Amino acid sequence: WFHVSLEEPDGLLTVLACKDVREVYLDSCGFGAESWKETAEACRKAGKRCGLLLPHIFRKKTEQYFRKHIRQLREAGFDEVVLRSLEQVGFLREQGVDLPMVFDANLYGMNKRACQVMKELGASRLTLPLELNERELLELGCEGKELVAYGYLPAMVSSQCVQRTVKGCSRQPGVMMMKDRTGKSIPVKNHCRFCYNTVYNPSPLCLLGLREQVKNLKALALRFSFTIETPKQIKTVLDQYGNHFLREQDGVMPWKEFTRGHFRREVE
């Protein structure tokens, strides 16, 4: 199955039109509380499950936002909520939100003991760590877990706003491009609703061409993390992955530069 996390609403119709997608995670940075119920209903009408993806940073301002909109969260009709910090476990319990909790990749289930601790904390499902290679993932066991198979991965999440430092605060979400010392363009996205930045890797993670290796892991679902892509790019990614992994065709690589992340990296 394909699961999609989506930061921007303009890609929603493209994702809902894809028959290979089983569940959509709405990123609360881009999908405000006023849209939760309507969007969750649209997902159900398209035959897909819907979850809410919480922010990476859960400070006082963010907590106040969710307290203010806790009724919308309870009544939106979400199937699950995806957590990115352990503070969110306590907050949801305190607020009486009785939804299955999916733990994202940064809540590290690095080994079997860590996975057990995450389950004891209330995780209904885990996302496999991005730092493990293929051999380590096989040793850990991927059954019942999600594998991130595509996306511009966060290199850094910061409460220090790059746009505010460079241009001044505009209170408008957007993407700035910076150059690293090698000349590569690095996307920096400001999430103004919760006032933090994500600095992304300049090249997307791509597992096209590794069909047998990925299938051997027997993960529950492949996760696609869409952050800065256009609807056209989203369609291309989903089409190529669907053809390659589900219909066993040769996937066409849509990018000149990409990374395998840690998947093919040996332990040093």
Image (cartoon, grey):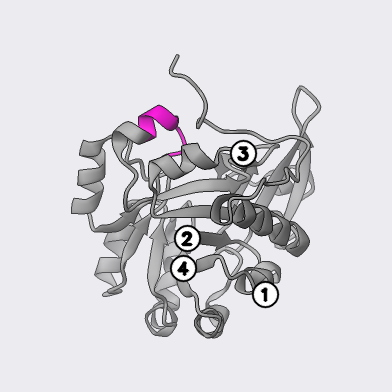
Return the residue nearer the eye: 218 or 180.
Answer: 218
Q: Quadrant of residue 4?
A: bottom right
Please report the residue visible at 54 percent of the width from the left and 60 percent of the height from the top. 5
Q: Could you tell me how far apart the alpha carbons at marks 4 and 2 are, in whole angstroms?
A: 18 Å
Amino acid type of the residue that numbered disc 3 sits on in the rendered structure = Gly
Q: Is 130 one of the magenta-colored residues? A: yes
Q: Return the residue at label 4.
A: 52
Amino acid type of the residue that numbered disc 4 sits on in the rendered structure = Leu
Please report the residue visible at 54 percent of the width from the left and 66 percent of the height from the top. 21
Amino acid type of the residue that numbered disc 1 sits on in the rendered structure = Leu
Local secondary structure at mark 2: loop
Q: Is residue 137 left or right of residue 15?
A: left
Pointers 4 and 3 in contact (C-beta within 8 Å): no
The span picked out in magenta is: 129-137
Pointers 3 and 1 in contact (C-beta within 8 Å): no
Label whose residue precedes the other's in the sequence (4 or 2): 2
Label 4: how many Cα within 10 Å (few below 14, some 14–19, many 20+): many
Q: Could you tell me how far apart the alpha carbons at marks 2 and 1 are, in whole angstroms?
A: 19 Å
Q: Position of residue 154 (x, y in %)?
A: 57, 42
Q: Return the residue at label 1.
A: 13
Q: Could you tell me how far apart the alpha carbons at marks 2 and 3 are, in whole angstroms?
A: 18 Å
Local secondary structure at mark 1: helix
Q: Return the residue at label 3.
A: 209
